[in-house]
Image (tube, grey):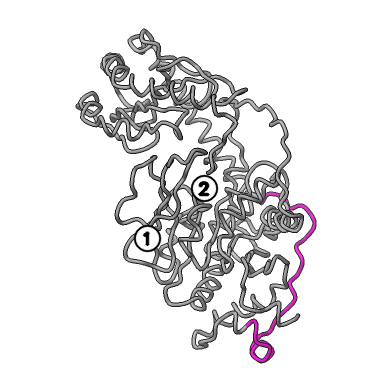
């Protein structure tokens, strides 16, 4: 291998960590294998992302990468915040990663303000979002909670890493989320999102669990880059219907727990090319065992003399080609969780059906139970409009009544959340909305403001007729208080259709 291949990275570096493992039921598989009936590798990803053994391996590497990057260098962690361990009785116990990562952890908060709302003083501005005509649509900013630590969990919408990632300046990003590997085909839009949200800055380093799906994502991304980053072809999305009665997918709850593993650096991309990861893995193993060695990991890998004198590199064994079966122990746990969720859902549906008999006062005002989607009941405050030409019509503003197991709430929502600032609207009228909610509470400072929240849900002994009578009176007052908002939305919708040919400069989160 040439010395050039081991040079200190000057372009985004991608490191995949994985390998063979024995899981809690005694079966063995390799994290890089495809798994039966699991096209997105959720089973192996969940296993690695929540594995103490994987995190010990990842932190031993990233810790040395941070040492090489300087005293103030830090890693940004996107996704998992805990690890799973097996108890003697076969149940699982979660432990926070803050107890695992050496040097301590903190949070890095990433926010977007509403329209012309300024960032709080403690935040650093990263990007201003603008519409096609230069109107400020909000500001993206971030702050690191004190005390500052070298391991920082991302708090906030990771969509905005596209705008803030380079300014945040993490020396390494550990991504254990499935945001970019879950459902759907690997297409140019996904490769663009991968580049924009994960590979910000020429010297950035991305560390991910090595699964069949994550390798496919990286290989597809590299081919997309070599092909000139072609745009996605316009295709009609398949029509899918959400079935609220469908059983939960057992794969979603399947998580084998590694009890033994040979995890290591199993994939390495530098300068847009796959490299042999064996020297980097050998350097990680050596520096993990020899705390006394004060050698930068890239120096150790890149210097021919040090490499030949200190490293014992072994070629990486290829991943098995055969499809692995889901480990039986994890599949059994998954089936139990699916059964428990199904039973809980059936219990909730029975309770909600009984509760609905008390909702005459709300139904008289136009509240209805939706056939699907959010909300136990909904109340449209405007007529239905298509958000864009060709879209299905939907109310511009509506109220949504939710009943969970232990509490109830009413929130307000507009489909024009990027044109009309509903958060600012209700905050400017805080006294009005708080007086309506009394003696209960409201929470106004977000894009789906909660106008009323009270303790007591479908599992509690609540006088629902009395509660709905109170909410009926609240509804009359909410309608009056939100009348100007509805007018603003109608006006914004009319303007939007007039300039539908002008998209926003900044894309919107899904």
In x, y percent, where is residue 161?
50, 53
Question: In the drawing, does residue 21 fall left or right of residue 92?
Answer: right
Q: Which residue is drawn at the image coordinates 44% and 21% (left, top)?
A: 490
Q: Residues within 10 Å of mark 2 (few under 14, many from 20)?
A: some
Query: Who is closer to the viewer here, 484 or 92?
Result: 484
In x, y percent, where is residue 172?
53, 66
Q: Quadrant of residue 175?
A: bottom right
Q: Main secondary structure of the magenta part?
A: loop
In x, y percent, where is residue 83?
49, 58
Tell me the SS state at disc 1: strand
Residue at the spot of label 2: 159
In x, y percent, where is residue 310?
64, 89
Residues drawn in magenta: 301-326
Image quadrant holding the N terminus, namely bottom right
Q: Residues within 10 Å of mark 1 (few under 14, many from 20)?
A: many
**Magenta segment: does it hold 322?**
yes
Q: CA distance from mark 1 to mark 2?
A: 18 Å
Question: In the drawing, does residue 274 fall left or right of residue 381?
Answer: right
Q: Which residue is drawn at the image coordinates 28% and 32% (left, top)?
A: 442
- The mark total stands at 2
Tell me the SS state at disc 2: helix
Q: Quadrant of residue 381?
A: top left
Residue at the spot of label 1: 144
Q: Height in image: 238 above or below 202?
A: above
**Magenta segment: does it hold 501?**
no
In the rendered structure, which disc, 1 or 2, sits on the residue that comes first in sequence? 1
| Marks 1 and 2 in Cβ contact (< 8 Å) | no
Q: Which residue is drawn at the image coordinates 59% and 84% (left, top)?
A: 299
User: Most extreme residue toward the right, as rendered?
Assistant: 321
Image quadrant holding the C terminus, namely top right
């Amino acid at each position: 291998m040439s010395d050039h291949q081991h040079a200190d990275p000057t372009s985004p570096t991608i490191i995949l960590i994985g390998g063979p493992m024995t899981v809690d039921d005694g079966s063995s598989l390799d994290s890089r294998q495809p798994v039966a009936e699991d096209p997105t590798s959720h089973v192996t990803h969940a296993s690695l992302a929540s594995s103490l053994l994987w995190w010990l391996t990842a932190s031993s590497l990233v810790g040395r990468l941070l040492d090489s990057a300087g005293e103030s260098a830090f890693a940004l962690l996107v996704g998992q915040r805990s690890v799973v361990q097996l108890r003697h009785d076969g149940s699982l116990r979660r432990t926070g990663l803050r107890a695992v990562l050496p040097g301590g952890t903190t949070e890095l908060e990433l926010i977007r303000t509403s329209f012309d709302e300024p960032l709080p003083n403690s935040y650093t501005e990263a990007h201003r979002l603008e519409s096609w005509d230069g109107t400020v649509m909000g500001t993206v900013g971030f702050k690191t909670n004190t005390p500052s630590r070298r391991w920082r969990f991302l708090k906030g919408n990771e969509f905005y890493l596209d705008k803030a990632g380079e300014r945040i300046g993490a020396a390494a990003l550990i991504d254990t989320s499935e945001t970019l590997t879950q459902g759907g085909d690997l297409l140019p839009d996904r490769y663009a999102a991968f580049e924009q949200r994960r590979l910000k800055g020429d010297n950035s380093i991305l560390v991910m669990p090595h699964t069949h799906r994550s390798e496919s994502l990286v290989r597809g991304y590299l081919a997309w880059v070599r092909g000139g980053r072609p745009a996605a072809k316009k295709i009609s999305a398949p029509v899918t219907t959400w079935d609220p009665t469908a059983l939960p997918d057992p794969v979603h709850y399947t998580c084998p727990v590694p009890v033994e593993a040979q995890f290591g650096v199993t994939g390495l991309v530098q300068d847009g090319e796959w490299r042999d990861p064996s020297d980097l893995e050998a350097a990680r193993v050596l520096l993990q065992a020899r705390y006394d060695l004060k050698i930068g990991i890239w120096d150790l890998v890149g210097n021919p003399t040090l490499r030949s004198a200190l490293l014992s590199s072994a070629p990486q064994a290829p991943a098995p080609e055969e499809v692995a079966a889901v480990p039986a122990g994890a599949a059994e746990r998954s089936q139990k969780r699916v059964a428990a969720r199904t039973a809980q859902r059936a219990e909730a549906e029975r309770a909600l059906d009984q509760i609905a008999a008390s909702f005459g006062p709300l139904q008289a005002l136009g509240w209805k139970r939706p056939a699907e989607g959010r909300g136990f009941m909904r109340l449209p405050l405007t007529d239905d409009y298509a958000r864009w030409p060709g879209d299905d019509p939907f109310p511009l503003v509506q109220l949504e009544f939710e009943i969970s197991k232990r509490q109830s709430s009413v929130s307000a929502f507009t489909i024009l959340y990027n044109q009309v600032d509903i958060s600012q609207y209700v905050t400017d009228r805080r006294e009005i909305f708080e007086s309506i909610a009394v003696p209960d509470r409201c929470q106004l400072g977000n894009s789906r403001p909660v106008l009323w929240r009270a303790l007591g849900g479908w599992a509690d002994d609540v006088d629902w007729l009395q509660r709905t009578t109170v909410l009926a009176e609240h509804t009359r007052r909410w309608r009056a208080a939100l009348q100007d908002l509805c007018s603003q939305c109608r006006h914004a919708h009319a303007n939007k259709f007039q300039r539908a040919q002008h998209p926003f400069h900044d894309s919107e989160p899904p």
